[in-house]
Amino acid sequence: MNTQQYITSWCVLKDNTININDRLISNETSEQPADLVKQLYRAHNMSYPKFFKMDALSRLAFVCSELLLNKRKLTDTYKAEDIAVILSNRSASLHTDYAYNESIIDRANYFPNPSLFVYTLPNIMIGEICIRNGITGENTFFVSSEPNFDFLTEQVNFLMNTGVIQCCLTGWVEVSAENHYEATLFLVEKNKMIEDTANFYTFAPYNVSKIHTIL
Amino acid sequence: MEDLIKELKQEIIDEFNFEDMTAEDIDTEAPLFGEGLGLDSIDALSLMVILEKKYGIKIEDPKDGKKIFSTVRTLAEYIAANRKQ
Amino acid sequence: MSGKVYVTGIGIISSIGNKVTENLESLLNQKPGISRIQHIDSIYSEHISAGEVGMNNEELCSHLGIKASLGYTRSTLLALVAAKEACDDALYTADENIRTGLISATTVGGMDKSELHYREFHEINTHHCYIATHDCADHTEKLAEELHITDFITTISTACSSSANAILLGSRLIRNGLLDRVLVGGSECLSKFHINGFNSMQILDPNPCKPFDENRKGINLGEAAAYLMLESEDLVKKNNKKYHCVVSGWGNACEAFHQTASSPEGTGAVLAMNKALKTANLLPSEISYINAHGTGTQNNDSSEGKAIETVFQGIPPPISSTKPFTGHTTSAAGAVEAIFSILALQHQILLPNLNFSQQMSELSFSPVTSLQPHTPIRHVLSNSFGFGGNNTSLIFSAE
């Protein structure tokens, strides 16, 4: 029995600009994307000191997930194990791979850094979101050269149609070697959980791509 | 000792990117792990790297780390007694 | 659409053999593949034990009939060897009327080459062909090209549960009729990058690892590639195909506890095992053997052990970790151990947990310590847990 899935909240960040649910909330082009992420963390009182220990990719994913959830506690609506986080990107953890590699490359100044090594795994950002929100459902991280929203929507809709999960945080979160930031995150829920579905886009490739390219 | 304590607080701020903090914000006597600064097991390993890199001290048994890293003061006292550089 | 998921082909290259039969022979002879590092120029060569594949890159190239150094990283070469064996075993031929997929897993990716050429790349932009191979998805593209798979291709990177998740996703796609057949697995070569990383976390045992032992000291890393061909019930019936077993259960859960550490009670592992049992529609008492994640770290074995006690209500079936044979092959481990689980099932043998001497004080069970032939085995549970709290359990069944 198929249900219909809707995008109940979304967040798009591209370098210096961010758009949440069709609302442009910052456009200070002079800033570095890393500074914008920090500024958003502070402006929205996310008060989570562990944020500062995270690498660039996890910080980006964390801030976007916080903005998209807007203080909502998903576990009030769903069982922790019914919520999934499924993300993808192009460069995996390349940005931090470089930083960590710097700590082992020079034999004269050789101090492998365990805190950096931990973040040389792209799925750690999913772990961070799950820890913050107490989510224990399915986790997957896909690597692809371009965002593949046909694939992602098929996967997520399928998991929700078959009842494996009830709710999903999904999208694309990328920090490139050249320091470009790009995140598109969606909160996907079933129609039966939504009062008026007319207010939301369906979770279909067409809508997902439209939102992804809004900036 | 007071200089070393201040220096260590700055090291900790730099290592863990606690950008919203200054050395004054860290309580010399407060626990570094769990409560307090909220450091964890991986951070303990990073502190060991700092000890080796900056002060030439190698902690062989990670279990010793627990006592040494309990507060900024215990850490400073250990470094003062064992530093090679 | 809820047909069975058949395993029609398997292929593996690891430190205990370059193909399935060689791996089986080493398992039967209880011959581990752990030694000092030889192929990597590391300052740890003298101090670290690891499971290295016997062939160097040139030998792998000539084994595959590839002209050397054309942008093939070691992970890709290993992947090609194992994937081709799995395809041959499944009598695979490209066929545009059969919806065919490829799901491959890696984390290290092309790190072995990137770290060699990293400096030069930053300075003078040379070695383009290897730097372009750094991305995790690169080895999947090469495999797809070589095997002419075009319908569905993706790469998974979830640390040490990566290839278990490739099997999970592939099984689900077959079970629900989205694909007819899919090659799933993973590949990981040793790199200075992750040897140093695990070493900096102080979880490498310089000597052969001792999973589930009271005096365990940590991991031996290893390199390997392993692939399974999964096919739909329709396809198997239609072609009257031979098969090894079925994938009957799968489950993935996030522990949401810590970036790298597992919770003392193993809550994520409990969730994953219970989900797998539910998918397979099996009771815990129906599991004949558990191929544990069993890395040999203090944290994993204690957490996984507790989780097993919880799921199996204190009376677990025979358990072993086969990591003392191969080392912890990180992203490839899930597929490597899937194949070992399948071999256990096919040959009705319990595989030994080598190097074990003393039961852990906090656990009520000890692992199997010697090869047990002629053991009735119907359902095998295989665990794979990764950093990020990513826990996956798979169940392989005779039918």
Image (cartoon, coloured by chain):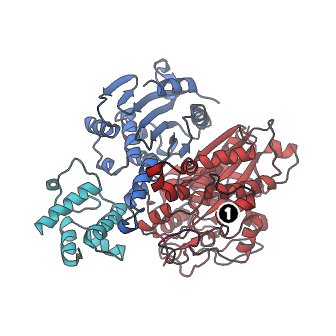
User: What residue is shown at x 71% (from left), y 52% (from top)?
Assistant: C247
In this orientation, does residue C255 appear? yes
| Frontmost residue, C192 versus A167 | C192
User: What residue is shown at x 75% (from left), y 54% (from top)?
Assistant: C84
Q: Is residue C43 left or right of residue C132?
A: left
Residue C148 location, x and y as percent? Answer: 75, 43
In this orientation, does residue C395 appear? no
Which tint is chain A?
Answer: blue
| Frontmost residue, C371 versus C65 | C65
Q: Which residues are magenta?
A: C34-42
Q: In the rendered view, tell whether residue C137 sits above or below residue C294.
A: above
Residue A81 location, x and y as percent? Answer: 50, 45
Q: Determine the residue located farthest toward the top in the rendered image.
A: A198
Which tint is chain B?
Answer: cyan
Reading the image, the residue beneath label 1 is: C58
Q: Which chain's colour is red?
A: C
